[in-house]
Amino acid sequence: MAPVVIITLLICAALLISPSFSLTCTSQKLTNEKTFRDCVDLPQLDAYLHYSYNSSNSSLSIAYVATPAKPDGWVAWAINPSSSGMVGAQALLAFKSKGAPVVKTYPISAYGPIKEGKLSFDVWDLSAESLDNNMVIFASVKVDEKANKVNQVWQVGPSVIDGNPAPHEMKDANTKSTGVLTLVGSGAGQAPGSTTSTPAASTPSPSTEKSEASAIGKLGGLIIVMLGSFIGF
Ligand SMILES: *[C@@H]1O[C@H](CO)[C@@H](O)[C@H](O)[C@H]1NC(C)=O
Ligand SMILES: *[C@@H]1O[C@H](CO)[C@@H](O)[C@H](O)[C@H]1NC(C)=O
């Protein structure tokens, strides 16, 4: 009996001491005043994208939330207008400079060290914030007028040396962190039944209530399992 009780108590303690742990992007609170229409739990690297797409001027506003690979590392989110991976990605990359979050732009033309520079599309309202262990990048970008989806790439890295982001790891999570983001915005003729090639990465939550309900459902299930383990003795 003792080991089960101890494990159960450890689970309870873990649940209690991580109040800011986000089950899904829908339960995530951003400190910034901005609100976003949609969000996705990105399928790799425990990252999240909150976004609003305005089709009348084809602008996409985002908040990208991720935890740097190490506390002094970096987080990045990119659109790749020409391909699906790192090469060609137009990246927004944030890290702490003397303790304060900064965000810079990196057009990536090849593997290897990346260099700050202007992106191939307009970027405005660019800012970065720290949120618990996470960093958040806020930005608005202009996307191709006819685009109804974009290739997104995201990443986290371990360190920044003399202002230069050090390479990220090459684990599965770091190499699979790409996908398609579907743009459905205010004013967009919402094509019913439209789908995308990588649903896990791109499907906006159809319903906030539904995701929250399922998160609560999972928690409820866990509590029932824990109660069961008590009653069992
Ligand atoms: C979308 O952009 C247009 C043109 O700038 C603007 O008038 C409209 O208010 C924007 N819509 C939203 C929801 O921000
Ligand atoms: C599009 O509309 C948004 C919301 O009104 C505005 O903030 C943004 O500057 C506009 N973008 C462009 C490229 O005109």
Image (cartoon, rainbow, N blue to C red):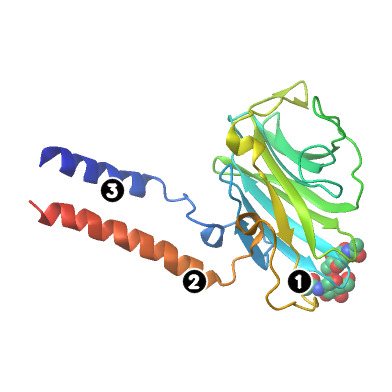
Q: Is residue 213 above or below residue 179?
A: below
| Image-based side of 108 in relation to 29, left or right | right
Give the residue displayed 27% in from the left and 41% down from the top: 10
Query: Mark 3 or mark 1: which comes first in sequence?
Result: 3
Q: Position of residue 62 (x, y in %)?
A: 73, 56
Q: Position of residue 68 (x, y in %)?
A: 61, 35
- Mark 2 Cα shell of 10 Å, populated few (<14), some (14-19), many (≥20): few
Task: Classify residue 177 by image quadrant.
Answer: top right
All told, the count of numbered labels is: 3
- What is the quadrant of the N terminus in the image? top left
| Image-based side of 171 in relation to 12, left or right | right
Give the residue displayed 77% in from the left and 46% down from the top: 84
- Mark 3 Cα shell of 10 Å, populated few (<14), some (14-19), many (≥20): some
Q: Are marks 1 and 2 in contact (CB under 8 Å)?
A: no
Label 2 element class: helix
Q: Position of residue 47 (x, y in %)?
A: 60, 47
Q: Is residue 4 above or below residue 60?
A: above
Image disc number at residue 210: 2
Q: Are marks 3 and 2 in contact (CB under 8 Å)?
A: no
Image disc number at residue 12: 3
Image disc number at residue 185: 1
Question: Label 3 vs label 2: CA separation?
Answer: 25 Å
- Mark nearest the camera among 3 and 2 is 2
Task: Classify residue 53 by image quadrant.
Answer: bottom right
Q: Is mark 2 within 8 Å of ligand 1?
A: no
Give the residue displayed 19% in from the left and 57% down from the top: 227
Q: Position of residue 77 (x, y in %)?
A: 73, 45
Question: Label 1 vs label 2: CA separation?
Answer: 20 Å
Q: Amino acid at mark 3?
A: Cys
Q: Is mark 3 within 8 Å of ligand 1?
A: no
Q: Nearer the viewer, residue 126 or 114?
A: 114
